[in-house]
Image (tube, helix red, strand yellow):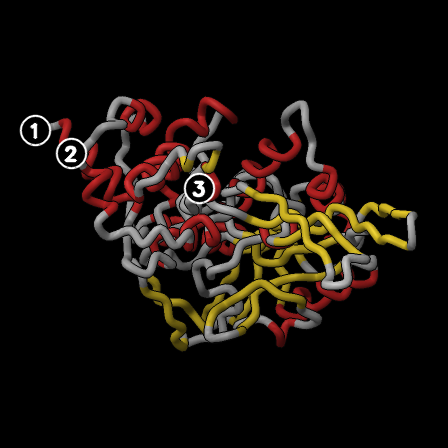
Amino acid sequence: MRSTEHYVMTIEGLQALIDALQRRGRRVIGPTLRDKVIAYDDIAAVDDLPAGFTDDQDAGRYHLTRRDDGALFGYAVGPHSWKSFLHPPKLRLWRAERNGDQVKVEPAENAAQELAFIGVRACELHAIAIQDRVMLGGEYVDPDYRARREGAFLVAVNCGKAGGSCFCTSMGTGPEVDGGFDLALTELISEDGHSFVIEAGSQAGREILEELPNRPASAAEVAAARAVVQRTAANMGREMPTVDLHQLLSRNLQHPRWNEVAERCLSCANCTMACPTCFCTSVDEVSDLKGVESARERRWDSCFTMDFSYIHGGSVRSSVAARYRQWMTHKLSTWFDQFGSSGCVGCGRCITWCPVGIDITEEAHAIHDSEQI
């Protein structure tokens, strides 16, 4: 853990944090149990968190199990990401209404409520930073994303458990948070009780920390928090090849592996929907049956759909192999050309939520290993 000031608070302090954020008019969102998964949703109290639950994940498999303790953050990541709140799946851009010969066009009034996220993992902080570069870093800025992102308060949590599909260590994105947060927690459970080592990462975080019941952390408590992260890093479920993935994939665009993976891929787009960094969208025009009202809506789309690459004459990527290659090479290779980094943070969602268990790390290893023969 970084050399900074660390404090300790109890579960009562965590409730005080939620209360402090709500007093400021923020919408507090955190992990909760819903539909047999750990999902991000509105929370009002510590009791809303998934106490004593963990997730068992592997390729194409996810289910919840009970822990033998009352850990509040004792899981990896669920099917949803914070992208759902910063870059929503569906967004109305404008609405029009016809009244006789007159047509009135109104811009969408999107929610301006400030958000507070509790339980943001290191890989997710990196995913938010990647989306920041996409939505805010260029000449054209997404105004809705900017409004949501600028007001967001991020409470990070250092991972105490690696999922079976996690590979953040090999991507350099976790499991320890390294910036981009307002407050960061490390959950400690021992014979001495249930507590959190907490540190501030921004002025806003320091201001709230001053309102919370806490005390300075001892050297032993900081060491215990460091041990949590080290243990998680040593138990990653998977890893990427430790090579230049950008160059590896760019020189293997005609590799036979693309056809092999296409035989299993359903082109269902689950991987892109679960991914915390994918940002592709399409725009639809919708109207009522009377022809009086119409609206333009933006929705998530995917490079796995035929229509996404459609131009006059047909789809540019008509085969499953071409669409899978597009997704994987963009994520791990050409993303560097566009945004200066990888588009993958090693969260493993694309592996867990693939119905046939296709593993992006396995595909990268297969292409890499073929060059070693």
Q: Position of residue 180 (x, y in %)?
A: 61, 40
**Is 51 drawn above or below residue 202 in the view shown?**
below
> How many numbered badges does the structure rendering display?
3
Give me the C-alpha separation between circle 1 and circle 2.
7 Å
Label 2 secondary element: helix
For disc 1, the marked residue is 373
Give me the C-alpha separation between circle 3 and circle 1.
32 Å
For disc 2, the marked residue is 369
Q: Amino acid at mark 2?
A: Asp
On the question of residue 213 being in view, the answer is: no
Cβ–Cβ below 8 Å for labels 3 and 1? no
Q: Residues within 10 Å of mark 3 (few under 14, many from 20)?
A: many
Q: Residue at x 82, y 59 (%)?
A: 25
Q: Which residue occupies the foreground of this view, 359 or 294?
A: 294
Most extreme residue toward the left, as rendered? 373
Q: Residue at x 72, y 54 (%)?
A: 115
Q: Residues within 10 Å of mark 1 (few under 14, many from 20)?
A: few
Relative to residue 110, is residue 197 drawn left or right? left
Relative to residue 109, is residue 52 drawn left or right? left
Q: Amino acid at mark 1?
A: Ile
Please tell me which of labels 3 and 1 falls first in the chain: 3
For disc 3, the marked residue is 303
Q: Amino acid at mark 3?
A: Cys
Relative to residue 100, is residue 15 drawn left or right? left
Q: Which residue occupies the foreground of this view, 72 or 243?
A: 243
Position of the C terminus, as image quadrant, is: top left
Please tell me which of labels 3 and 2 falls first in the chain: 3
Q: Residues within 10 Å of mark 2 (few under 14, many from 20)?
A: few
On the question of residue 97 being in view, the answer is: yes
Cβ–Cβ below 8 Å for labels 1 and 2? yes
Q: Residue at x 63, y 28 (%)?
A: 137
